[in-house]
Each structure stands twice: as structure tokens, then as C-alpha cells.
Image (spheres, grey):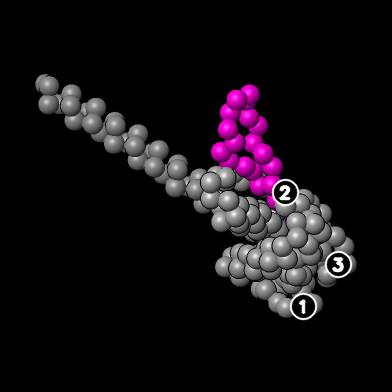
Amino acid sequence: MKNLSFFRHRSLRIGALSLLSSAVLAGSGCYSLTGGSVPPHLKTIAIATVADRSSFGQPVWREVATQLLVERFRNDNTLQLVDRSGDAELRPALVTIAEEPVTLRAGEIERERKIRVAMDVEYFDAVKGRTVWRRTFTSEQFFPIAQAATARDQAIRTALEQIAGDVLLAVISDW
């Protein structure tokens, strides 16, 4: 009798597990992070060189930002990247690169700082001749003061990488 009871419960568990697995697999086909919401008339995109209006004083960051945006879109391959005259255009500009102290309590020694990066981006539909959206993308990164310029530069690069990913997501998901 005990053996019969074990198999009966085991088959119920297996049946419930099979049903749950089927539901998960069926549902997973209905959701996508990229969603394919790029309008069908947009096949190509041109990315303008990032303008630098940040007054940070290091022009290398506009080049790095441009390179990161180009790499993200090239690797994603939702839209074909072209040098100019794309169906869509991105017009990015660095507006802020600022180093700021982290809030300290009285008597504490400053050990880390924060870098804040902001980029204004216009996403333009050249086929329809209209701006799809204009947004400011921001990222804040912390870095240890002990490593000064090297850590600050890595924090800026990390912030620009995050912004490039956010811009790509905004374009391909149209949020």
C-alpha cells in the first residue's frame, strides 16, 4: 500500500512540474526585451559624432562616446549602421561630465568621489522627417580617490558604456 501511495504522489508531482514547464516555455515566446518595435520603414541608422558641450576639457570623451555608440549599434544589428543619410539618425551631445564629492559626515576622510555623465540624444526619423524623441541619458559612477585620474577615467568610460546601452535600448524598444 505504501508503494502505491508513493507512485500516486510522484505522478502528481511530475504532472504538475510538466504543466508548469509547459506554461513557462509557452510564455517565454511571448516576451522579448528588444521587442522589434523599430518601425518597418527604418532599416539604417547614421550616428553623428558626439558633440561635447560638457566643458570638461578633455575632447577624448566625445570620441570614446561616439565609438561606444557605434559599437553598440553594430553589435546589435537591429538597424544597419551607415556613415550618413540613414533612414534614422542619432544626434548625441555630451552635456555633463562632472566630478563631485560624495556626501561625508563630520570627521570623515574623503575616500571616493562620484562622476556624473549626461548625454542629450535626438533620435530623428529621416524618412518621415520628424524627431521621434529627444532625451537626456545619465549615469553616475563612483571611484576611489587613491587611484585618482586612472579610476576617474575608468568611471567616465563605464558611465559612457551604460549610456550607450541605454540609447540603444531606447531606439530599438522606442520607450
Kind of residue at disc 2:
Ala
At label 1, the amino acid type is: Arg
Q: The residue tagged with tag 3: helix, strand or loop? A: loop
Q: Residue furthest top?
A: 1
Residue 128, which numbered label? 3
Which label's residue is closer to the chain start, 1 or 3? 1
Please state the horizontal and vertical placement of residue 16, each as a whole percent of the image: 35, 34
Q: Nearer the viewer, residue 110 or 131?
A: 110
**Stretch in magenta:** 99-123
Q: Gap between marks 1 and 3, in whole Å?
A: 16 Å
Q: Nearer the viewer, residue 156 or 137?
A: 156
Q: CA distance from mark 2 to mark 1?
A: 31 Å
Of the two numbered discs 1 and 3 in the rendering, the one whose residue sits closer to the viewer: 1
For the point 64% across and 36% down, the residue is 102
Residue that numbered label 2 is attached to:
98
Q: Amino acid at mark 3?
A: Lys
Mark in front: 2 vs 1: 2
63 or 87, nearer to the observer: 63
CA neighbours of label 1 inside 10 A, class few (<14), some (14 to 19), many (20+): few
From the viewer's perspective, tell me whether residue 87 is left or right of residue 35: right
The image shows residue 156 at horizontal and vertical percentages of 63, 54
Q: Residue at x 88, y 67 (%)?
A: 129
Disc on res. 84: 1
Q: Main secondary structure of the magenta part?
A: strand
Residue 31 is a magenta residue: no
Q: Using the rendered view, name the quadrant where residue 36 is placed.
A: bottom right
Q: Secondary structure at mark 2?
A: strand
Crowding at mark 3 (Cα within 10 Å: few <14, some 14-19, many 20+): few
Can residue 5 be seen here? yes
